[in-house]
Image: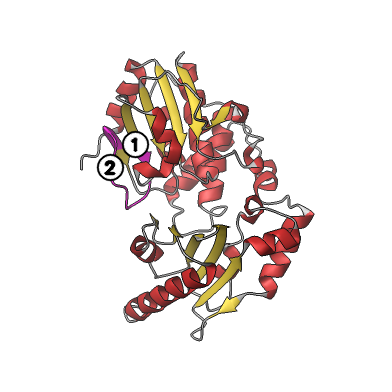
Amino acid sequence: MKNDTIAEIKELILDYDKFLVTGHIGPDGDSIGSILALKLALEQLGKVVEVVIADELPDCFSFLSSSTSIKEYDTELEVDFDLVFVLDCGTWDRIAEVEELVDEQIIVNLDHHSDNTYFGDYNFVKEVAATAELIYHLIEVTPQLDLNQDIATAIITALITDTGSFRYSNTTSRTHQIAAQLLEYDVDTAYISRQIFGTNSYENLKLRGQLLRNLQVDKSGKIAWMKISQELLDDVGTTLDDTAGIVNYPRSLEGAEVGLLFKEQASQEIKVSLRSNSYLPVNEVAHKFGGGGHARAAGCLIEDTLEQAEEKIITALAKALEKYSATV
């Protein structure tokens, strides 16, 4: 597993002309912000850049410049490129169907996950607050590139989302230094935060109310979780698109170490989001079920019923808590 240097990545963007930029399925702020910041930067060099992701762009990120250029994968889609940048993905399969577009082209893997598999022909992997920090670094070391308001807005959107508005433990002095530099470009962080966190549909608030009423906690008080079934979504009149950020409710429970959200995406297809507050590396639990992520934020997909997925994850977490509680 070779980790390349930022200088090598810089040479790639100067040497090639046609790029595909993509990110993970279920795109979040870091994925979208990093993708758009890199796209805008490459276009400063006169490069041809296509952006394709496997999912629809979440509405809350539609305010970002060039967001309308993001294409959702389709079997009829044809893209001409020499090199693909895969952003914010610990493994190759995280780009889902987009991999069908890639044949013999060069793969560049830029990511901040500790469990990254170094799947690229070139890899620049570093544990930082967000992948967007790596995009900032790339711009920083490339004299031909300049920060501007649109790029700065995309990068700070990524930082805000992946650090929980700079509240999470992944926030470092470097993160704050980058944010301070970005603010020099008249970035409106209040507006960004309103777009991402401050606007909820009636159905979204109704769903949150139902979930809070049905919040579950284990006997130790260390594990708190919520479950979203398709039946609940139908009753409320909403979709899974309205569930962003909900996992932070159980995580915020006083005394809880772990917060969970179980989402029934389809029959026998349960997405599990895991968050921890202090000492439990939830990515270790996610790995047991084919998932991954960070020590404090991870996820996995379980092909089972909602009830069975709940039982499996809670049992695994209880064992992990028993193991790690002894070290605290």
Residues under numbered marks 1 and 2 in contact, where contact means CB atoms less than 8 Å apart: yes
What is the magenta range?
Answer: 110-123
Residue 88 visible in the displayed image: no
- Furthest toward the right, the residue is 202
Q: Is residue 105 above or below residue 132?
A: above
Q: Is residue 30 above or below residue 268?
A: above
* Mark 1 residue crowding within 10 angstroms, few (<14) / some (14–19) / many (20+): many
- Furthest toward the left, the residue is 1
Residue 197: give x, y in percent of width and height: 66, 51
User: Which label is found at residue 118?
Assistant: 2
- Furthest toward the front, the residue is 267
Residue 229 visible in the displayed image: yes
Residue found at x 53% / y 44%: 27
Tell me if residue 118 is in the magenta stretch. yes
Residue found at x 39% / y 62%: 286
The earlier-in-sequence mark between 1 and 2 is: 1
Look at the numbered disc 1 and give the secondary structure of its residue: strand
Q: Disc 1 marks which residue?
A: 109
Q: In which quarter of the image is residue 210?
A: bottom right
* Mark 2 residue crowding within 10 angstroms, few (<14) / some (14–19) / many (20+): many
Query: Which residue is nearer to you in this view: 77 or 220?
Result: 77
Residue 96: give x, y in percent of width and height: 43, 41
